[in-house]
Image (spheres, rainbow, N blue to C red):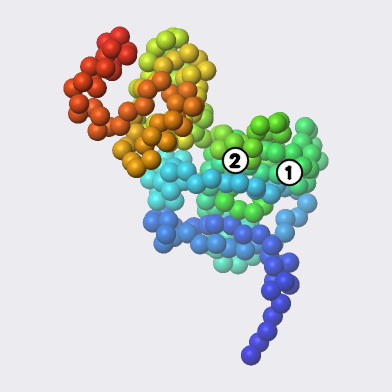
Amino acid sequence: MVFFSTRRLLAAFPNRAVVYSNHGDPSKVLTAVSYGSLPSPPKQTLNVRFLLAPINPADINVIEGVYPAKPIPRQDLTRSGLGSSGTPAFVGGNEGLALVEEVGVGVPGLKPGDWVVMTKPQAGTWCTTANLGMDDVEKVPRVPGLSEVHAATMTVNPPTAYNMLNEYLRLDEGDWVVQNGANSAVGQAVIQIAAARGLKTLNFVRSRDNLTQLVKELEDLGATKVLTYDALSDKAVRKEIQEWTGGKV
């Protein structure tokens, strides 16, 4: 029988990454690899440690190979096997919050202990640590009220909601916005941004056991009206919607 020190093994390979080499069902193609400590960052780069990295539906689409944006395969994670030059692998994850651990020469405005988020799409955030270019991150002010969860989820869904409300149609104060999937991350951002702009929102969600609780949560965010899809089958409800919106919906 052979014994070995797990402490020594963990010291040699303290980092982990969720990777894949082929597209497909995430439950079948994803695996985890261990890799060693990062060397000091080269010029104009920094080493970071990820604090939180969410899983978005688009992340699953990327792994399946059906999302337009494609990640760049990594071949510097390991010396052999997945993540090496012989078998490049993709690191999952598009957004996340990281803590700056070490800064290379020529990186202004950042220091160890700062929070950063990714500015480069498909950055591969499902890992412990990473070396990143200074142009691939944006500093996040550590201000009261901004949690790690807020910071880790600010680069995908909130910008999507903002662009939908600003880039496609002129909306003036008092206008109505109708959305489905209102309890999704994007939907909740739409509610809050719309409320801040003085827009009214008609929000549709699926029926569920805790519907009363969900309606209150969305109203607390600023939702004007919340209905289920099933409610649309009621002619009286459809009449109410026309009354609420002045016949615009």
Q: Nearer the viewer, residue 227 or 68?
A: 227
Q: Regarding mark 2 in the picture, which secondary structure is present there?
A: helix
Label at residue 170: none
Residue wearing tag 1: 100
Identify the residue at image location x=45%, y=9%.
173
The residue furthest right is 105
Residue 140: give x, y in percent of width and height: 68, 33
Query: Can you tell which of label 1 and label 2 is closer to the viewer?
Result: 2
Identify the residue at image location x=44%, y=42%.
58
Label at residue 149: 2
Q: Residues within 10 Å of mark 2 (few under 14, many from 20)?
A: some
Sequence-first disc among 1 and 2: 1
**Amino acid residing under circle 1:** Val
* CA distance for labels 1 and 2: 17 Å
The residue furthest front is 212
Residue 141: give x, y in percent of width and height: 71, 31
Vertical side of 6 occupied by 137: above or below: above
**Amino acid residing under circle 2:** Val
Q: Nearer the viewer, residue 166 or 229?
A: 229
Identify the residue at image location x=64%, y=54%.
128
